Amino acid sequence: MKPIHTLLIGLIFFMVTSCSSTKTINPLKLLTNKSWALSSLAGKSLDMSQFPGGIPTLNFLEDGKLSGFTGCNNFSGNFSLEEPGIKLDPGAITKKMCPGSGEEDFIAALKKAGDLKIARDKLTLLDGTMELMSFVPKN
């Protein structure tokens, strides 16, 4: 009986130590060094008539800088990863006249974002549990 007891204790010890050494995914590494293209807004697929200049994008830089394209204008601001989520500030935006409400909706959603889900192939910005927008890496 003692060998089985020792084996079980050893197995439990191995499982606990191997789990504690597993590194968590660093969201900053997944966010930076790529451009993210908008794929949905307010939980719906994009209506491209609202973005006549092209698909909006986000670019996260390692020093907390944020830049992107609204579908009409360019912007340059800041972001910070905070507990429990993210804070986005689009900052300065160029002032071209834009048809439709796509740009306004995009900027409003950016400002509301307080949390994120991230994987290699998808970034989702949330307000609580409500999905505001999702992005995919831009090719």
Image (tube, rainbow, N blue to C red):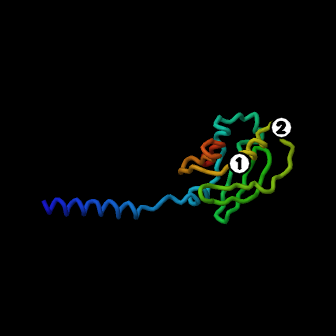
Upstream in sequence: badge 1 or badge 2:
2
Residue closest to the eye, 63 or 85: 85
Q: Position of residue 109 (x, y in %)?
A: 71, 45
Which quadrant would the N terminus be assigned to in this image?
Answer: bottom left
Q: Residue at x 74, y 49 (%)?
A: 69
> What amino acid type is highlighted by mark number 1?
Lys
Q: Say which of marks 1 and 2 sits in front.
A: 1
Q: Position of residue 25 (x, y in %)?
A: 50, 58
Query: Disc 1 on helix, strand or loop?
Result: helix
The residue under label 1 is 112
The residue under label 2 is 99
> What amino acid type is highlighted by mark number 2?
Pro
Tell me the distance, in whole angstroms, between the alpha carbons under discs 1 and 2.
Answer: 22 Å
Query: Disc 2 on helix, strand or loop?
Result: loop
Residue closest to the eye, 99 or 80: 80
Mark 1 nearby-residue class (10 Å; few <14, some 14–19, many ≥20): some
Q: Position of residue 44 (x, y in %)?
A: 65, 35
